[in-house]
């Protein structure tokens, strides 16, 4: 069984979690051109890599960040989101 | 079936990345319809090793958007005499395609699709349980007592074909016209000068070319990274499986929109089945017990007598998903770099029309009218094609 560590609830089966997409920073909506906004809304870094992603532990509603290798499916770290951390 | 040249030449008019159905079909129509035969098709693995040999081989045109319906209908038309065209039996078999609705909301979507289809001349009809029962008497209409079947979108031209043979047939026919197919040849880079493609780097050396077509579906992001193009593609595994062979009992193709299940019986007697996409991004063709367990539960709900039938094998392919469930095709911001991508869960049925329209797009450096709605720039222009008739969409 594949396990993931929720930062609050510890190790739980992967079926208890939901994927929320990659962690991305939103450009300022009022100052962005249509093209910059479309790039943010639609475009993704699609190639396999170690990515920072949003995940949710469904049973408790905890949203957190997982660093996962999308080529091997190995989960490297999980932690609660912090406003000032660097991301794509 | 065709010669396998060892060495690459130093120049080709067109280089196609990916010897799947789409890439080989494009090569074939470039040679047949446009007289462009100085073409190399490069394949990192073996011919048809990607999505071409991993789908569930369903061919249909009963989509929801006008853009989608016209495109897939033309593909279905091309499939109908493709065996003769390629001189190879593709086991193309017209079966009739039922998309079951288990709720009022789904029935409404099915009616919507049926009306769009009929308006565009595609044979589709909303039918009640009695019509389904005539063609599929073994179906449990209560679905185990929890998801009663209320009706279905019936699409009589729905068909299946032998997917590997489609790649072999296109490959052989292209090769006979002078196209070179190089398997075990990996593309490692694309050379761009002043916004134009000038060459391609491979594991067998450098090749000069002014035109490159990427037809690699689930591997597209690593190719677009080589030319610095951003796309909305996100890769998810799509799994499938087959049962042990059974005596023929299922003539039609049965799909359940609510249960996310599709099943048909191959000419060998195996039930070929698929379900929903894996729920998160992953670039690996691994199989999971979750998938086969969930699928088997839904299958036994519809056909309780299959409870003792064994699953023979399961596998996965990489689906390059787009936000609007439509492909990304045509020219790009890099001159001479063409994309045939965004094939998600709907690529096999589009093989002939993709080959034909991409060949014309490459030959004339102008997008074929049928694929203009699917251009990459539609996202920047906020002109998406919401294709809710795709298999990946729940209703």
Image (cartoon, coloured by chain):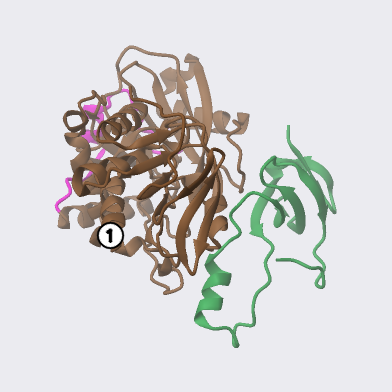
Chain colours: A green, B brown
Is B18 inside the magenta-drawn segment?
no
Q: Which corner quadrant of the image does residue B381 belong to? A: bottom left
Q: Considering the image in quadrants, where does the N terminus of chain B appear?
A: top left
Residue A62: horizontal and vertical position, in percent?
Answer: 76, 57
Residue B371 drawn at (x, y percent): 30, 59
Which is the main secondary structure of the residues drawn in magenta?
loop
Q: Which residue is at a point 49% across and 49% down the rendered structure image? A: B320
Q: Is residue B80 visible?
A: yes
Visible in this render: residue B231? no
The answer to whether B223 appears left or right of A25 in the picture is: left
Residue B111 is situated, as x and y percent measured from the top left of the image, at: 26, 53
Q: Chain of mark 1?
A: B
Asked which secondary structure carries label 1, the reply is: helix
The residue labelled by disc 1 is: B67
Residue B334, image quadrant? bottom left
* Callout 1 crowding tier (Cα within 10 Å): few <14, some 14–19, many ≥20: some
**In the rendering, at what x and y percent does residue B91 appear?**
26, 24
Q: Judge whether B33 appears above or below B198 on screen.
A: above
Vertical position of residue B220 compared to residue B336: above or below: above
Give the camera-side residue of B284 and B7. B7
**Horizontal side of residue B187 vs B282, given as left or right:** left
Residue at image location 74% in from the left, 66% down from the top? A87
Identified at 43% across, 31% down, the residue is B47
Q: What residue span does the magenta drawing correspond to? A: B121-149
Q: Nearer the viewer, residue B225 or B51?
A: B225
Residue ID at (36%, 36%) = B180
Query: Relative to B339, is B250 on the left or the right?
Result: left
């Amino acid at each position: 069984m594949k396990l993931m560590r929720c930062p609050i609830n510890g190790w739980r089966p992967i079926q208890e979690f939901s994927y929320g997409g990659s962690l991305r920073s939103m450009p300022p909506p009022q100052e962005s051109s249509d093209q910059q906004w479309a790039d943010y809304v639609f475009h993704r870094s699609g190639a396999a890599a170690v990515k920072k992603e949003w995940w949710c532990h469904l049973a408790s509603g905890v949203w957190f960040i997982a660093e996962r290798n999308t080529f091997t499916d190995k989960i490297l770290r999980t932690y609660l989101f912090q406003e000032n951390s660097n991301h794509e | 079936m065709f010669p396998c040249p060892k060495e690459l030449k130093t120049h080709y008019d067109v280089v196609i990345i990916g010897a799947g159905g789409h890439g080989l079909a494009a090569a074939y129509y470039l040679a047949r319809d446009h007289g462009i035969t100085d073409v190399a098709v490069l394949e990192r693995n073996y011919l048809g090793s990607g999505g071409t040999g991993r789908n569930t081989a369903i061919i249909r045109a009963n989509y929801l958007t006008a853009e989608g319906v016209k495109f897939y209908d033309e593909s279905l038309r091309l499939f109908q005499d493709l065996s003769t065209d390629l001189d190879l039996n593709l086991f193309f078999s017209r079966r009739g395609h039922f998309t079951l609705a288990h709720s009022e909301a789904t029935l409404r979507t099915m009616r919507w699709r049926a009306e769009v289809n009929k308006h565009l001349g595609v044979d589709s009809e909303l039918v009640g349980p009695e019509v389904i029962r005539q063609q599929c008497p073994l179906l449990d209409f209560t679905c185990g007592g929890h998801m009663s079947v209320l009706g279905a979108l019936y699409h009589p031209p729905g068909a299946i074909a032998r997917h590997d043979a489609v790649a072999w047939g296109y490959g052989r026919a292209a090769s006979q016209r002078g196209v070179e197919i190089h398997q075990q040849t990996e593309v490692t880079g694309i050379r761009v000068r002043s916004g134009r493609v000038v060459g391609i780097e491979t594991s067998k050396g450098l090749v000069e070319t002014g035109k490159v077509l990427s037809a690699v579906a689930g591997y597209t992001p690593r190719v677009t990274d080589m030319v610095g193009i951003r796309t909305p593609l996100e890769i998810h595994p799509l799994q499938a499986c087959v049962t042990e062979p059974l005596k023929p009992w299922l003539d039609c193709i049965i799909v359940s929109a609510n249960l996310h299940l599709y099943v048909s019986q191959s000419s060998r007697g195996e039930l070929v089945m698929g379900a929903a996409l894996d729920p998160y991004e992953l670039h690996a063709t691994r199989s999971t017990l979750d998938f086969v367990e969930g699928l088997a539960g839904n299958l036994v709900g519809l056909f309780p007598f299959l409870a003792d039938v064994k699953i023979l094998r399961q596998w996965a392919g990489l689906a390059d998903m787009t936000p609007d469930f439509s492909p990304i095709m045509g020219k790009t911001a890099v001159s001479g770099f063409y994309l045939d991508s965004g094939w998600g869960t709907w690529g096999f049925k589009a093989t002939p029309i993709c080959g034909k329209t991409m060949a014309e797009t490459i030959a004339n450096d102008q997008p074929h009218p049928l694929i203009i709605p699917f251009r990459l720039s539609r996202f920047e222009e906020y002109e998406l094609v919401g294709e809710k008739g795709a298999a990946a969409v729940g209703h």
